[in-house]
Image: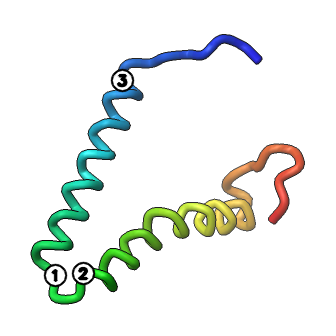
Amino acid sequence: MGELTVVPVWIIQDIIVLIAAVLMVFYILDKETHPKTVLLQFIGLCFFTPPFLKLLLHRLGKVSTPMGAVF
């Protein structure tokens, strides 16, 4: 494996996204009447939507997958 590439902009973007996610969780816990349900929806949106979207785009021929990827 090659050397690790450190790009400061990527690190800053990751930090901003993590801060936004934490703020969103605190907002949901504070303002929603049913926070558990909304948090489960938030987690589902964040973790389950991207793989299905990639699968859909792959089936439409818009995205190529690496060798050995199984769908």
Q: Which mark is residue 5?
A: none
Q: Residue 54 location in percent, x, y?
A: 63, 60
Question: Which residue is at 70% across, 66% downward?
Answer: 60
Q: Position of residue 43 (x, y in %)?
A: 42, 69
Measured Cα–Cα span from mark 1 to mark 2: 5 Å
**What residue would you read off at disc 1?**
32
Q: Please state the horizontal and vertical placement of residue 50, each as a whole percent of the image.
A: 55, 61
Image quadrant holding the C terminus, namely bottom right
Secondary structure type for disc 1:
loop
Disc 3 is placed on an element classified as helix
> Given the image, on which type of amino acid does mark 1 rest?
Glu
Q: Residue at x 16, y 81 (%)?
A: 32
Give whichever of discs 2 and 3 has the lower sequence position: 3
Residues at circles 1 and 2 in contact by the CB criterion of under 8 Å: yes
Mark 2 to mark 3: distance in Å? 33 Å
Residue 16 to residue 37: above or below: above
Within-10-Å neighbours for mark 1: few <14, some 14–19, many 20+: few
Residue 22 picture location, percent across and down:
25, 54
- Residue type of the residue flagged with mark 2: Pro
Instruction: Give the residue displayed 25% in from the left and 46% down from the top.
Output: 19
Q: Which residue is mark 2?
A: 35
Relative to 2, is 49 above or below?
Answer: below
37 left or right, relative to 6? left
Image quadrant where residue 26 sits: bottom left
Q: Residues within 10 Å of mark 2 (few under 14, many from 20)?
A: some
